[in-house]
Structures are given as structure tokens and as C-alpha cells.
Amino acid sequence: MNKFVIYAFALFAVAAAAPQGPQPEDHSQVYILKQDSDVSPDGYQFDFQTSDGTSRQEKGTLKQLEDGNQALEVTGSYQYVAPNGLTYAVTFTANENGYQAQEHSSQ
């Protein structure tokens, strides 16, 4: 009999702790809304967009350098929504001169 009472109380506690009514949207789950990519011997490109406002586009092309070598030149951009609600966007280029980025923010 004591075991039955303990199980009944445990079941009641679990049921009472369950959320009641409509729940706020779960922002811990992020979904891919769009995703494309293409890879070739001369370079690549990809882009994606997620349900939390994050996106990225990037393109890499093989570039002939003056010394006869080849290098990958990458251009692209990405954006995300920060916890403060601002959307931050970055455009960038990466090549033999290094990584150069420009940041932008908006509400």
C-alpha cells in the first residue's frame, strides 16, 4: 500500500509540474530555411539562411597571381540578430592581401 501511495504522489507531482496552456515559441530550435552550394575545380559558392535570422553567402574563386602561383580569393557576407535585437551584417574579402571586413548594424 505504501508503494502505491508513493507512486501516486510521484505521478501527481509530474502532472502538476507539466506546463499548462499555450507555451511561448521555443527559440532553442533553429531550422535551415535555405541552403545551396556548388563546388568546381575553379572555386566554390554557398549560401544558407536559418529561422533565427542568420544567413551567409560566400564565393571562392581561383585567382592567378603575378608570380605564377594560384590562390583562392573569397568574398561574401553574413548576418545575424544579436540578443539586443540589432541585426549585424558583415561583408568581407579574403585574398593575398589578408582578410578585410566591414561591419554594419541596423534595428
Image (cartoon, rainbow, N blue to C red):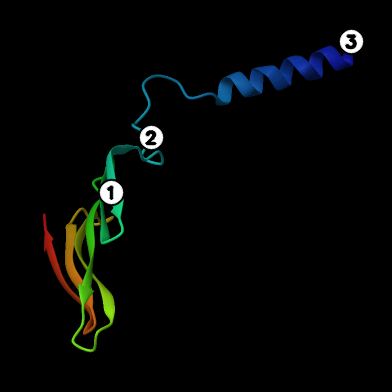
Q: Which residue is mark 3?
A: 1
Q: Is residue 96 above or below residue 74?
A: below
Numbered circle sitting on residue 26: 2
Q: Is residue 26 left or right of residue 91?
A: right
* Residue type pointed to by label 3: Met
For the residues carrying marks 3 and 2, which lies nearer the camera in this image?
2
Residue 73 location in percent, x, y?
A: 22, 71
Q: CA distance from mark 3 to mark 1?
A: 67 Å
Residue 51 location in percent, x, y?
A: 28, 39
* Residue type pointed to by label 2: Asp
The front one of 81 and 16 is: 81
The reply to whether discs 3 and 1 touch (Cβ–Cβ < 8 Å) is no
Image quadrant occupied by the N terminus: top right
The residue at the point 56 percent across, 26 percent down is 17
Q: Earlier in the sequence, mark 3 or mark 2?
A: 3
The residue at the point 21 percent across, 85 percent down is 97
Dot 2: few (<14), some (14–19), or many (≥20) neighbours within 10 Å? few
For the residues carrying marks 3 and 1, which lies nearer the camera in this image?
1
Residue at disc 1, secondary structure: strand
User: In the rendered image, which quarter is residue 62 located in?
Assistant: bottom left
The reply to whether discs 3 and 2 touch (Cβ–Cβ < 8 Å) is no
The residue at the point 65 percent across, 23 percent down is 13
User: In the rendered image, which quarter is residue 11 located in?
Assistant: top right
